[in-house]
Image (tube, grey):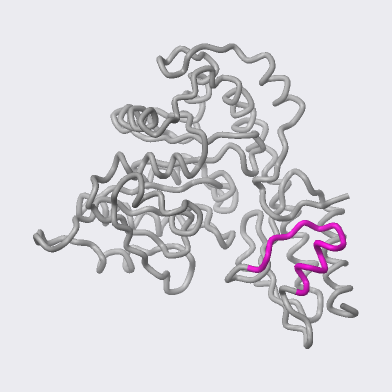
Amino acid sequence: MIREFRSDTMTLPTEAMRDAMRDAELGDDVVGEDPTVCRLEALAAELLGTEAALLVPSGTFGNQCAIAVHARPGDEVIVSETSHVIDHEAGAAAALAGVQLRCVTPAARSWLTAGEIEPRLRTVPDVHHPETALVVLENALADGTAMPLDEMAEVRTLADRHGFGIHLDGARLFNAALALGVEPRAIAAEAHSVTVCLSKGLGAPVGSVLCGGREFVEAARRRRKQMGGGMRQAGIIAAPGILALTEGVARLAEDHRNTRLLAEALAAVSGIRVDLEQVQTNMVYLRVEAPERSEDGLTEYLNRHGFAVYPPLQWGIRLVVCSRVDADDCAALAECVARYVERG
């Protein structure tokens, strides 16, 4: 048996989701006539407090669609160097939107602060410079933390003052809301547009929603068509998406509880370092500090013993908890780590 700790993209649809796919009422979504898609989009907009929402094939698609709506070719977009847009979207912003990405290294945490963004803004017109059109934020972030709401509000104040847009890559926005103890719409309110992934911890097999103002979403709908994202009878994927936004969101707390159990068990292992303050959502990063042991070696050991884990990242070995593992699986992984440290 393989215990899955690589990513919450490895979630599988529930039986209720499979039934909903089979029974979904369908129409042609490109002309706005798929009733199940319409229900999903209305639900997403309601949960996030936006005027409208748009079903898109993936989070990358949603992010790139948003960038293309907010910015013109030749504009500049400010992003964190550790962001999904930089590390996991295959240079799409340059290829599809023709924009220049200006990468900023966060000084302390993994999110960009208003103080780090402001010096990079192009506020004085200059024929030599691109124009700042957009800042892309993330919440939750790649290191598993959640960007505090007051930090997001400071960036929004800066955006309002200087007239640039904010797009939020909210692939795990509901995890962030749970960690911060706020409503999801409170996070979304600090951005002009937001992408939420249905197929990570929420458990749908495919799809994301791109949310924002009505005019923005209509422009994004046109851009979606240009990008090949008109999916016709898309209710077959919208149906499990509806359950993701109801049942999936409701069960995220279980993932967070199991993540905390895993983190505390690992932190108790001699030779393993876990920063418990950084464990805020459904991710744990661990460092191997035991003599003659390594993170590459531990990754290989875990995979060999039935725990699926990706190779180490810049923050260490990432372990992601989702519906495919439970508290017993988390305890078993911590025991396996202890065995590696003790005996290798």
Q: Considering depth in this image, is 242 or 128 the residue closer to the camera?
A: 128
Q: Considering depth in this image, is 41 or 189 the residue closer to the camera?
A: 41
x, y (%) of residue 324?
A: 77, 45
Q: Residue furthest bottom?
A: 291
Examine the structure image and report whether residue 306 is included in the region drawn in magenta. yes
Q: Residue furthest front?
A: 95
Q: Considering depth in this image, is 304 or 257 the residue closer to the camera?
A: 304
Q: Quadrant of the C terminus?
A: bottom right
Tally the numbered discs: 0
Compared to residue 153, the image places residue 225 above or below, namely above
Compared to residue 12, the image places residue 243 above or below, namely above
Residue occupying the point 73% across, 60% down: 309
Left or right? Give the position of 240 relative to 155. right
Left or right? Give the position of 117 relative to 3. left
Compared to residue 277, the image places residue 97 above or below, namely above
x, y (%) of residue 49?
A: 43, 34
Task: Tell me where the magenta segment starts and ends, as one range.
Answer: 297-312
x, y (%) of residue 130?
A: 19, 58
Examine the structure image and report whether residue 115 is included in the region drawn in magenta. no
The quarter of the displayed image where residue 91 is located:
bottom left
Residue occupying the point 25% across, 69% down: 119
Q: Considering depth in this image, is 90 or 13 the residue closer to the camera?
A: 90
Compared to residue 183, the image places residue 215 above or below, namely above
x, y (%) of residue 245?
A: 59, 32
Left or right? Give the position of 74 relative to 62. left
Residue occupying the point 63% across, 38% down: 249
Residue occupying the point 23% across, 55% down: 132
